[in-house]
Image: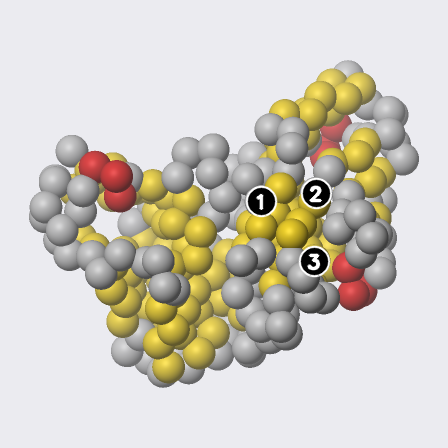
Amino acid sequence: DAMVIQNPRYQVTQFGKPVTLSCSQTLNHNVMYWYQQKSSQAPKLLFHYYDKDFNNEADTPDNFQSRRPNTSFCFLDIRSPGLGDAAMYLCATSLDAGPYEQYFGPGTRLTVT
Amino acid sequence: AQRVTQPEKLLSVFKGAPVELKCNYSYSGSPELFWYVQYSRQRLQLLLRHISRESIKGFTADLNKGETSFHLKKPFAQEEDSAMYYCALTTGGGNKLTFGTGTQLKVEL
């Protein structure tokens, strides 16, 4: 089945230790998104790629970076995780720009110790 | 900036009872409105969108621009409807979703 895959599902990292979360898709969609969702809060868009074009949200901290080496893969890098970065990170894709349906991965639960 | 408000964190109804999940938004233009749903141990997925004007799994939602609302309704709740429901919008023909904080629907027997 075509889908959005996130690895790992659970990630524990230490305060200040860089961590990378991975997302891959078999849908061949042009757009890939990263959302952060803290407990009892709404998913919050961090950034997205339209093909190779990176689009950062104005309030996304510099601590968060992303890479999209090819159509299928997108990575979220947190350079120096703080305790406040503990959250569920959701990857999503959509066919193209515009109000298309977004297809979500299962998420990666990040714990910072 | 746009905002989506879902006033109820938890809504509990009995099987067979009508369901209404409330969603209000603030945006001065014409948004696109969506309902996404997350069943237990499953990923977030689209339930319906207002421009499709369709009924999915018995759910409907009507965009009321005067009241800036997009409430989700179902006449008879089923046990399998128990899930987390998120209202969301995009603006300006764009693709950036702004989500509400979600409502947990619990359908009791």
Task: Say whether disc 3 or disc 2 marks the residue closer to the N-terminus.
Answer: 2
Image point 35% across, 68% down: which residue? A56
C-alpha separation, residue under disc 3 versus residue under disc 2: 10 Å
- Judged from the image, the secondary structure of the residue bearing numbered disc 2 is loop
In the drawing, what numbered circle is on residue A31? none
Residue bearing the label numbered 3: B33
Image point 74% across, 18% down: which residue? B108
Tags 3 and 2 touching, CB below 8 Å: yes
- Above-or-below relation of A100 to A35: below
Q: Write down the chain letter for disc 3.
A: B
Tags 1 and 2 touching, CB below 8 Å: yes
How far from the left and from the top, in percent, is residue A52?
A: 36, 82
Kind of residue sitting beneath label 3: Leu
Kind of residue sitting beneath label 2: Cys
Looking at the image, residue A78 sits to the left or right of residue B12; the answer is left
Q: Write down the chain letter for disc 2.
A: B
Kind of residue sitting beneath label 1: Gly
Residue bearing the label numbered 2: B23
How far from the left and from the top, in percent, is residue A47?
A: 38, 65
In the drawing, what numbered circle is on residue B100? 1
Circle 1 packing at 10 Å, graded few (<14), some (14-19), many (20+), is many
Looking at the image, residue B70 sits to the left or right of residue A106; the answer is right
Can marks 3 and 1 be said to lie on one chain? Answer: yes
Residue A74 visible: yes
Task: Say whether disc 1 or disc 2 marks the residue closer to the N-terminus.
Answer: 2
